[in-house]
Amino acid sequence: MARTKVAVIGSGNIGTDLMIKILRLSPTLEMAAMVGIDPSSDGLARARRLGVTTTANGVEGLIGLPGFGEIGIVFDATSAGAHRANAAALQPYGKQLVDLTPAALGPYVVPAVNLDAHLAAGDVNMVTCGGQATIPIVAAIAAVTPVAYAEIVASIASKSAGPGTRANIDEFTKTTAAAIEQVGGAGRGKAIIVLNPADPPMIMRDTVHCLIGDADTDAIRASIEAMVADVAEYVPGYRLKQAVQFRKIGPDEPVHTLTPQPVTTQVTVLLEVEGAAHYLPAYAGNLDIMTSAALRVAERLAEGARP
């Protein structure tokens, strides 16, 4: 069976790691083009060494490539602002776009939660690294009992936060919070990102706090553990750092400032995400979970496009 040809826009860390994952791991995708704007970038240089067609002329260079018509899926690993321009330029050509930026032009997709609902979308958004790590947990709790409020804290190594991440901090928090509600099912969502300057760099850590009413804690724990296993199928370094924690909320705690809904219990889930080190260092689990999730999405899109 012929593989689906794909292109990656963005020759930085995320785009390069994604390219290497496609080349090494995917039986259904064929790396057809790597697109950048810096002719001297390491990503373009690696692509050329690996026999991948390259252009340093951005999306217009991609459109001008001889084999552009054969490309079915385009990944965008640039920035929120750049994706808006890239999506507009590619719109007339009918490509399926997988957006790894916080632009959120298309529906939010978290593979373990809602991928099958958006296989026909022309532009799917991968939310953020924090969203990919934590929204499955919120959804797992929401599958058992309503989640009135969900707050996530994504702590990543400062060294793993490139210029794109730093330029999109506001988009990160807004996009992640919105997806916690729309995909995770929380009544209200909040997201916080911490860039930790520790040396040696720390592995990505994620904390999820959810406020719920009375519920079956064993069922919640089982749902979370099953979801962690589902995510770990495409992100092998994804794991629970500690056992799921439940705490009764005291009568004097001002949780009414977070949600008007009556709540009795706080659920806390501590996660760790270690990268596969295909191109990025192992501590950059925040970037690895994005590229791993994007790869899973594109493979499913490709399967859905076949007759």
Image (spheres, rainbow, N blue to C red):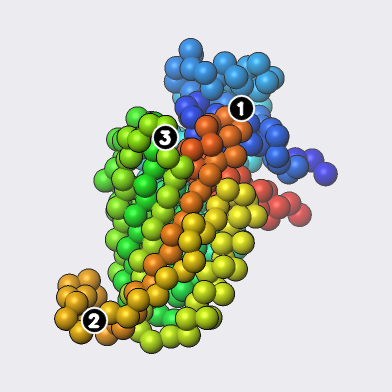
Quarter of the image for residue 89 reads top left
Which residue occupies the foreground of this view, 45 or 104?
45
State the residue at coordinates (38%, 87%).
214
Q: Which quadrant would the N terminus be assigned to in this image?
A: top right
Quarter of the image for residue 85 reads top left
**Horizontal side, residue 16 vs residue 152: left or right:** right
Q: Find the residue positioned furthest to the top.
A: 40
Dot 3: element: loop
Indicate the amino acid at tag 3: Pro
Which residue occupies the foreground of this view, 297 or 161?
161
Dot 1: element: strand
Mark 2 vs mark 1, foreground winner is 2
Mark 1 vs mark 3, foreground winner is 3
Dot 2: element: loop
Which residue is labeled 2 in the image? 250
Disc 1 to disc 3: CB gap under 8 Å: no
Q: Residue 245: x and y, percent?
A: 42, 70
Q: Is residue 149 visible?
A: yes
**Which label sits on residue 33?**
1
Q: Is residue 90 visible?
A: no
Q: Earlier in the sequence, mark 1 or mark 3?
A: 1
Other residues around mark 1 within 10 Å, as few (<14) / some (14–19) / many (≥20): many
State the residue at coordinates (48%, 61%).
242
Disc 2 to disc 1: CB gap under 8 Å: no
**Which label sits on residue 201?**
3
Indicate the amino acid at tag 2: Gly
Q: Is residue 147 above or below residue 65?
A: below
Other residues around mark 2 within 10 Å, as few (<14) / some (14–19) / many (≥20): few
Q: Residue 50: x and y, percent?
A: 68, 20
State the residue at coordinates (31%, 71%).
149
Task: Determine the CA span between mark 2 and mark 1.
Answer: 57 Å
